[in-house]
Structures are given as C-alpha cells and as structure tokens.
Image (cartoon, rainbow, N blue to C red):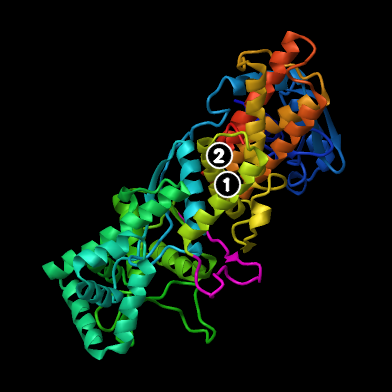
C-alpha cells in the first residue's frame, strides 16, 4: 500500500477504537505544521467526557507507528502531528515506482455503475452546452473504470417526440439521398431550421407533420424507416465529434428516449399498483414526498398526459427501473446541468417510494454550471447563436498549433500537428474540469492555452520536459533503484507523489475533478522546486543520479496517469 493517508488512517483508527470502544475516523490530513495531522480526538471529547488532549495522547500511545513515523506530538487542543521517517517514504516510493498502477488499488467491492451523460438531440447540432456533460461524464467513466468498477455509459439521446413529424416530412421534401448528405456533413442545424421554418409558415406542411407523428407513434413501417435514417445519420455525426473530442463514448452507448418506449406502460402499471399514481386534470401523476410549489401544493411528475402521451418523467422513471432492476446497477450518475436538479430529485424520490432505489442502490445528480463568454453571459457566437462544439474544438487546435510552432519550431510538421491536437483538446477539457463543477466558468482562450499557471498545457509541458531529460541523457529510468531523500526538495516531492492514490479515491467518490487538477498542479510545482534545487543528470554519484531519475520518471508517470483520468493526453515533446 502506498496511500500514506489511508495507511496512517488505518493505524490510528485501530488506536482510537481501543480508546473509544468503537471505530472512529481519525480524520488524517496533510498539515502545514507536520507531514500529517490527525483530528480524531476532538469529536470524541464530549462523548467520552475527557479532555481531547488526553484522548489524543492515549491514542498516540496505543498506535503502532514506529515503522512509519519519526516524530509525533500532541499539539493545540488535541491534534496529533506526525512527521514521517525518510526511510519509510523511500520504501513507499519504491513500491509505487514498481507498480504500474502507481499505488491506486482496484476497488475491494466493484460496483455496476451507469453514467448518463452527453445527451445530444437527433437532427440538432452539438454545441458548447453539450461540452460539460460530455467531458465530466467521460472523466467519471475513466476514473471509475480505472478503479475496477463495471462502468456502463448511457448516452440518453433525444430521438423521439413530436418534432420528428416535421423532420421526417422535411426529409421527404428534400429526398432521402439529399437529406442524408446534409446530415452526414454535419449541417444538422440547417436541416432542423429548414423543417421548423416550413412548419411555422406552411399550414399544409404542419398538418402533414402532425399526421406523421401519429404514424410514427403507431409503428408505421415506412415512417419508422425514415425516422431510423435521421437517427443513424445524426449518430454518425455525434461519433465524429466524440472522436475529435477524444472521449470514450461509442455507438454501443446510444440509449435514446425511444429505447424506453416499450417500458413506459409497465412503469405506469407498476406505479399504479403501488398506489403512487393520482389523477390531476386528466393526467396520471406522481407526487413525491417533500416537494411543494410556492402555493404550498404538492408538485407533480406528469407520467402520462391527458392525451395518452408520456412525459419526460415517465422515461426517466423507466430508465431508473430498468437500470436497477434489470441491469442490477448500484450507482447511477446523472451528469446533467444544475437547472434540472429539482426534476431529477423528484424522479429519484419517486423511485425510492417505488422501491427501485433501495440501499445500497443510489442515484446522484452530478450537477454543473454554465460555460460563459467574456461578457459574463452563456457562451455564444457573435451573432448570438450557440457555438457549435466542433467549431470550438477546431479553433482550439488551430490556436494551439500556432503556439506550438512558435515555441518549438524544430518539431517536424506531423509532430507539431499531433502536439497541437493534444494541447488544444486538452485545454478545452482542463478548463472545464479544473474548477468546482457546480460553478459557472468563463471561457478565455489566452488563459486556457497558456504554458504557465493552472492550465492543462502547463502540466503537459511538465511531462514533456521530464521526458526530455531522459532523451538528453540517453538513459532509461531504473525503476528498481534505491530512493535517496537527501534534500528537502526531494522529500517534498516524495510527499506529493505519495498523495496520488488518495486523490484518485476522492475523485471517484465525489466526482469533483478539480481535486485531481489541483493535485497535479501541486505535484508539478514540487517537481519544479526539486529540479531547480537538485541536479539530475549531473548528480553527485551514480546512486543519487539513479534516485533522482526515478523521481523524475515517477513524476512523469503520475502526471500522465492523472491527466489520463481526465481524458487528456501527455505528449513527450512540446
């Protein structure tokens, strides 16, 4: 085990349990006053009727820390300060270096996790608003997969409903071949807007569209074939965008609204049988406990409308029922914007009342804020339209290409293009993941593509700079070399490196990926301080040189693995 925080926590938890007579969280964390601090004595004071300093002193006396800790003391009102032994740090670093996973363990009890994210709409362009759900969902999928969970990606595509009447009629007006071409080259907005304009201006077209909706919902074979054409061409385009963005969604992950059509009647029957459905103005609704409007009246989820159609709530409830009862998932993650919080919370509560979300099964809304432009408003084009996601990605790569060419003109054209792609796409992802996801963030090209500061490019540059050391020296790292921590900067770097497993565990639990980016920035800062203070290729003696090369290698691997969890590539040259 190389997770220092966890290792110390286990030892101290045993000691506190002996004092308190029950398991207690020792609350171990990094400290400015020592390597680590444990605060577990303070919450025990009232329960045990003892001074927290006395509790801390007794726990410290019982803890088996001799092989890890060089100095320990009780300070303040009852904190335990711990300074680790250098030889213990060196041993843990050696174990981390020898481990391809860098000390990140596989989950002891892997779960089936379903992540619902991205959510584009058929025959509509993916825009900047789709960026956050797609990037955050992809980071969640990568991180949880890395820990050994069975991750199922669910791309809940908008592929059903009344707009498809006008879209199919517009397709017929254009001709199937021309419509398929228009969609395949990515002009989804033009196609949708053309259909909408005719629907609004031509009563005959509008009537044909309404009749086509009826035909679609009744299963007319010709109409279903045309609908499938729209869906297939749109999905091809979505996959091209995902490939450019470098996310892990595939064709097998599309689960559109239509996927749940056959499950809607059974959901209504199940809710009705459980006594959870009530009539409200002719509609069938659930009224989950704890939700009222401004007038104090209970808020409904419309499951079946007065006209017999189904609301979004019905589809969402069908999805939860299917995912928990059929797929046996125990963790459901909905990566959806913050404005949908009340709707999702009401759906989750209804599912609990139906027995579909019973422990250990749980559903979580992974909420996020908006992407803002320089004017503080939702990111838009100069014409006030939504920014196409593919255009945003292309501009990121083009801007990165100019910067890479200026900074390293000696790179050949192919390498420059590949590095520009990594830096440009990485910048888009990093700026999205590096702030608390619930907050809005401002899209700023100059800041996000900078090679210094809190940017993805800075971390990529750190990785490339380390790789250049091995090229210049013509050496490969000896991952079995003895670790020597003779300089304070070496020790500080060691402490940062050993924090990686705990950060990954926290990201998997909270899905707050700014904790990962913050850790990587701290690691890069510690590496820079080490590199400035400690000669590597010109170190005094072969043993010290091999140790410092190992530290360089371990830093590069940790940066690369940390970025990989976020879906960001780490170039070896920049």
Label 2 environment density (alpha carbons within 10 Å; few <14, some 14–19, many ≥20): many
Instruction: Look at the image and tell me whether residue 278 can be seen.
Output: no
> Residue 161 appears at what percent x and percent y?
29, 73
Q: Nearer the viewer, residue 219 or 58?
A: 219
Q: Is residue 463 above or below residue 388?
A: above
In the image, is residue 378 part of the stretch drawn in magenta?
yes
At which x and y percent is residue 403?
64, 46
Q: Which mark is residue 401?
A: 1
In which quadrant is the C terminus drawn? top right
In this picture, residue 41 sits left or right of residue 303: right
- Give the camera-side residue of 548 and 6: 548
What residue does disc 2 label?
416
Q: Please tell me which of labels 2 and 1 falls first in the chain.
A: 1
Dominant secondary-structure state across the stretch colored magenta: loop
Residue at x-position 25% and y-position 90%: 203
The span picked out in magenta is 363-387
Residue at the far right in the pictured view:
76
């Amino acid at each position: 085990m190389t997770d220092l925080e966890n290792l110390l926590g286990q030892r101290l938890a045993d000691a506190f349990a002996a004092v308190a007579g029950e398991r207690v969280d020792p609350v171990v964390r990094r400290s400015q006053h020592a390597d680590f601090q444990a605060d577990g004595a303070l919450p025990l004071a009232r329960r045990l009727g003892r001074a927290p300093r006395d509790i801390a002193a007794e726990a410290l006396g019982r803890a088996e820390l001799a092989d890890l800790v060089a100095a320990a003391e009780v300070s303040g009102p009852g904190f335990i300060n711990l300074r680790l032994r250098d030889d213990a740090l060196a041993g843990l670093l050696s174990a981390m270096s020898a481990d391809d996973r860098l000390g990140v363990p596989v989950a002891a009890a892997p779960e089936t996790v379903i992540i619902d994210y991205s959510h584009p709409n058929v025959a509509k362009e993916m825009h900047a608003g789709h960026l956050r759900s797609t990037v955050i969902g992809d980071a969640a999928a990568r991180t949880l997969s890395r820990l050994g969970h069975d991750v199922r990606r669910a791309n809940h595509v908008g592929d059903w409903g009344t707009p498809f009447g006008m879209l199919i009629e517009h397709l017929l007006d254009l001709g199937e071949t021309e419509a398929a071409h228009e969609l395949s080259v990515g002009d989804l907005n033009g196609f949708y807007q053309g259909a909408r304009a005719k629907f609004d201006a031509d009563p005959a077209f509008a009537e044909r569209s309404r009749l086509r909706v009826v035909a679609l919902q009744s299963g007319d074979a010709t109409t279903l074939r045309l609908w499938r054409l729209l869906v297939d061409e749109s999905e091809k385009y979505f996959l091209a965008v995902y490939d450019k963005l470098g996310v892990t969604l595939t064709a097998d992950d599309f689960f559109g609204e239509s996927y749940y059509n056959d499950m809607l009647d059974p959901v209504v029957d199940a809710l009705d049988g459980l006594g959870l459905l009530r009539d409200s103005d002719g509609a069938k609704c659930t009224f989950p406990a704890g939700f009222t409007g401004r007038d104090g009246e209970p808020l409904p989820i419309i499951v079946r409308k007065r006209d017999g159609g189904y609301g979004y709530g019905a589809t969402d409830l069908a999805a939860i029922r299917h995912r928990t009862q059929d797929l046996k998932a125990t963790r459901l993650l909905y990566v959806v914007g913050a404005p949908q919080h009340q709707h999702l919370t009401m759906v989750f509560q209804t599912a609990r009342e139906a027995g579909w979300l019973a422990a250990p099964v749980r559903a979580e809304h992974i909420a996020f804020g908006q992407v803002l432009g320089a004017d503080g408003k939702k990111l838009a084009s100069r014409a006030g339209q939504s920014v196409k996601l593919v255009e945003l990605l292309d501009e990121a790569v083009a801007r990165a290409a100019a910067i890479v060419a200026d900074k390293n003109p000696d790179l050949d054209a192919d390498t420059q293009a590949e590095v520009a792609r990594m830096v440009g796409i990485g910048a888009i992802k990093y700026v999205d993941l590096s702030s608390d996801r619930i907050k809005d963030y401002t899209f700023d090209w100059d800041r996000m593509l900078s090679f210094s500061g809190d940017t993805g490019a800075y971390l990529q540059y750190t990785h490339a700079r380390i790789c250049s050391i091995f090229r210049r020296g013509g050496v490969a790292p000896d991952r079995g070399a003895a670790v020597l921590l003779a300089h304070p900067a070496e020790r500080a770097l060691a402490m940062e490196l050993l924090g990686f497993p705990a950060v990954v565990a926290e990201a998997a639990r909270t899905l707050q990926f700014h904790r990962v980016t913050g850790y990587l920035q701290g690691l890069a800062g510690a590496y820079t301080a080490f590199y400035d203070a400690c000669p590597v290729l010109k170190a005094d003696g072969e043993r010290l040189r091999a140790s410092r090369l190992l530290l360089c290698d371990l830093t590069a691997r940790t940066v690369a693995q940390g970025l990989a969890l976020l879906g960001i590539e780490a170039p070896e040259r920049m």
